[in-house]
Structure formats: C-alpha cells, structure tokens
Amino acid sequence: MRIAIGGDHAGFPMKPPVVDLLQSWGHEVVDHGTNSTEPVDFPDIARLVCGDVKSGRADRGIMVCGTGVGAAIAANKIPGIRASLSHDTYSAHQGVEHDDVNVICLGAQIIGLNLAEEILKVFLDAKFSTDDHFRRRVEKLGELERDAARELG
C-alpha cells in the first residue's frame, strides 16, 4: 500500500517512528513533513497528504498532530476526504469498514507509539464494506459535499 503521511510540529516526535513502522510492514511511504519541532500550520500539511489520497497517488493518509483534532478538521475540508480522529482500534477499523475513511488522524500528545501501532495496523488492514446501506451512506456524504459546493459557488 502507498501511504501519505504528515504532521505538524506537535506530531513530529511520533511521525518518524511511524514512518519506520509502516516501511517495516512493506508499505511505500510518502512523507510530507514536517521534519522538526519548528512550528508549522497543520492545514498546509493536510493539503499535501490529502492531495495524494484524493488524486490516487496514495491509497490512504495518516496525519499526526498534537491531539489529532486540528488535522481531522483540516482534512475533512477537502472534498473526497473522509478523515477520522482515532485513538482506539475499534473506530480505526470500523471507520474504514462503514464510512470508507481514507485518512486517519492521531494525537501524538494523547496516545503512545504502541497504541498508534495497533491503531494503524487495523486501519490499514480494514476494507470498506460491500453492504449496500454503508455504500448508500457514503454516497450521501458525497452529495453533502456537492450540495455545499453548489450553495457556495
């Protein structure tokens, strides 16, 4: 799987070990930074990570910031992105299975690397359900995006 990853300065301490972990699992990783604890704005990083996912250059995306909240807000502003803040394994796999989540957001100041590893494993192994009711609901999310674009347009 090809995975786009990025984070802000608060997520930086967790990002390099996560990149190493993903690569050890055999994934190709595209790292969009940041690469230090110097302050950066997470919306700029979200634009890069989500751009890869939206275009198909990446299969999934991972955002790491302090709490994961800001990253999730920023990612969900991009049409076609369904980002989830996940600090537990159940929401990480269920989000993909039921809601076709394509970007996961983690809070480096909230969870440790061991839990992040468990969360990422189930997130990356999960597949979107073939059940009609889940697919219908995700299509309605797309309709909401299109309706909002028309109203603003």
Image: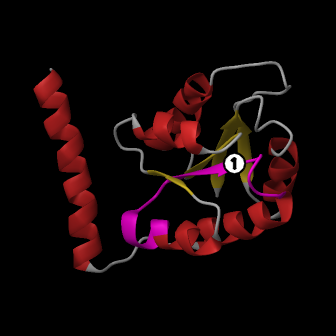
Residue visible at 85% across and 25% down?
37
Q: Is residue 21 inside the magenta stretch?
A: no
**Residue 74 position in % (x across, y down):** 49, 33
Q: Position of residue 124 (x, y in %)?
A: 62, 65
Other-residue count near label 1 (Cα within 10 Å), few / some / many at <14 / 14–19 / ≥20: many
User: Can the viewer see residue 57?
Assistant: no
Residue furthest out toward the bottom: 131
* Residue 89 visible (yes or no): yes
Residue beneath label 1, please?
A: 107
Q: Quadrant of the C terminus?
A: top left
Tell me the kind of residue under disc 1. Answer: Gly
Residue span colored magenta: 95-112
Residue 151 figure quarter: top left
Q: Residue at x 25, y 53 (%)?
A: 141
The local secondary structure at tag 1 comes to strand
Residue 122 to residue 3: above or below = below
Total numbered circles: 1
Q: Is residue 71 left or right of residue 40?
A: left
Residue 118: percent from left, percent from top: 74, 70
